[in-house]
């Protein structure tokens, strides 16, 4: 996102966090969806293909998590730090919504 637009809408440096969080949520959904699909399929060949996709989705989730942790965007082992990040993100979302009204 353009820096000027980020500043106008009050997002500042949160763009990386927003994108990474969205990607992480999508990766989690993919893991769940592949796991469900594996339990619903009947052919061994399809199960094998879906298991590979599941493994890839898990690896992607891990990479995103590691990236976010390294950048200080995600603190899964420190709930107070994660709470502060979540509260900041919530405040930003509220402020953005108010500016757009």
Image (tube, rainbow, N blue to C red):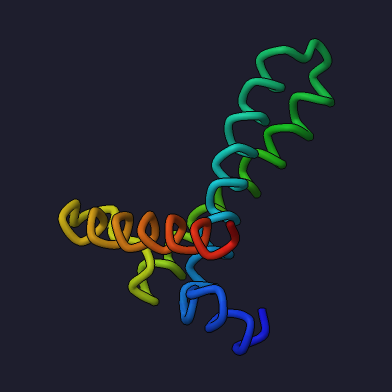
Is residue 84 or residue 53 the one in the foreground?
84
Q: Locate residue 17, reporting x and y percent.
A: 48, 68
On the question of residue 24 being in view, the answer is yes
Is residue 46 or residue 35 the one in the foreground?
35
Whether residue 11 is situated above or below residue 32 in the rendered picture: below
Q: Residue at x 53, y 65 (%)?
A: 99
Whether residue 40 is situated above or below residue 100 in the rendered picture: above
Q: Quadrant of the N terminus?
A: bottom right
Q: Looking at the rendering, which quadrant does residue 95 occupy? A: bottom left
Q: Residue at x 23, y 60 (%)?
A: 84
Could you tell whether 46 is left or right of 56 in the image?
A: right
Q: Locate residue 71, reporting x and y percent.
A: 39, 76
Whether residue 28 is situated above or below residue 40 in the rendered picture: below
Whether residue 65 is situated above or below residue 71 in the rendered picture: above
Q: Residue at x 42, y 65 (%)?
A: 66
Instruction: Tell how many labels.
Output: 0
Could you tell whether 84 is left or right of 62 in the image?
A: left
Q: Locate residue 69, reporting x and y percent.
A: 36, 67
In the displayed image of the protein, which residue is found farthest to the front? 101
Q: Residue at x 69, y 21 (%)?
A: 38
């Amino acid at each position: 996102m353009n820096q000027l637009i980020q500043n106008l809408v009050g997002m500042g440096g949160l763009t990386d966090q927003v994108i990474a969080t969205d990607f992480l949520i999508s990766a989690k959904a993919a893991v769940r969806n592949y796991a469900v699909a594996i339990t619903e399929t009947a052919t061994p060949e399809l199960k094998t293909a879906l298991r590979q996709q599941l493994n890839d989705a898990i690896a992607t989730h891990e990479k995103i998590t590691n990236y976010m942790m390294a950048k200080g965007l995600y603190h899964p082992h420190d709930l107070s730090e994660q709470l502060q990040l979540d509260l900041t993100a919530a405040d930003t979302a509220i402020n953005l919504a108010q500016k757009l009204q």
